[in-house]
Amino acid sequence: MARKIKDDNGHVYVEKKPFYKRVWFWLVVVVLVVIVAAGMGGSGSSDSSDKSASSSSSSATPLDKVYKVGQTASYKGYKIKVNSVSYSSGNEYEQPDSGKQYVIVNVTITNDTDESQDYNPYDFKLNADGNNTDLDEIYTDVDNTLNAGSLDKGASVTGNMVGQASTSVSKLQLQYKTSVWNDKTVKFDLKSNQ
């Protein structure tokens, strides 16, 4: 609260608090610290896992290579493997949009770091001929859907994600976005087995 001061002539002045003693200043500082801390999260893992990710080319980084179904990508302590991909035209009660099919992707995520790591299906996108969409379709014929969670050191989780893509798509990829702060992705080719 500002303090009122009266001078010798009877004028009243308001003495204001310095900015660093105000509540709004400290709220801004806390928000900035949280943003910086979130941006640094996950960057503490070793780069040795990045180097071990390229199974066929020792000079390629995990972000330069496009993986196939069955291959494991390793990026900053996460090991991601697309176990299988299947397609469905729906059932009696659930059908995809006109001209599309359900794309069911089964993945395994393993935490290869020394600390707990979060995972989220919204870190993955289905890229159909350059169109990125979420894998958030609800299709009751698919069990064991991948939900968000945390993995302890050495733990892994396997689950299904369901999206939609055109039946005539020529290029279909699963893309794992490495951070909300950049556009870098680890890519898996889902059509190479067809």
Image: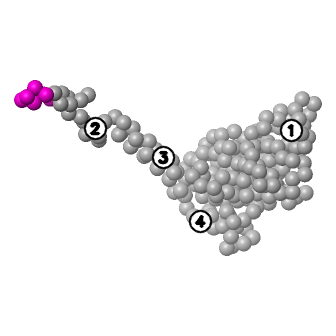
Q: Main secondary structure of the magenta part?
A: loop
Is 192 contained in the magenta span? no
Measuring from the top left, give residue 95's x and y in whole percent. 88, 35
**Please, what secondary structure does the residue beneath circle 3 have?**
helix
Q: Nearer the viewer, mark 2 or mark 3?
A: 2
**Please, what secondary structure does the residue beneath circle 4 have?**
helix
Kindly identify which residue carries mark 2: 21
Question: Are circles 3 and 1 on residues that touch, CB within 8 Å?
Answer: no
Amino acid beneath label 1: Asp
Q: Residue furthest left?
A: 8
Q: Distance of mark 3 from mark 1, alpha carbons?
A: 39 Å
The quadrant the C terminus occupies is bottom right
- Left/right of residue 23 with respect to residue 112 in the rendered view: left
Kindly identify which residue carries mark 1: 97
Kindly identify which residue carries mark 4: 48
Kindly identify which residue carries mark 3: 35
Name which residue lies at 23% across and 34% down: 16
Specify start and end residues of the magenta stretch as a single range. Answer: 5-11
Measuring from the top left, give residue 71's x and y in whole percent. 77, 60
> Going from the N terminus, do you reach mark 3 or mark 1 first?
3
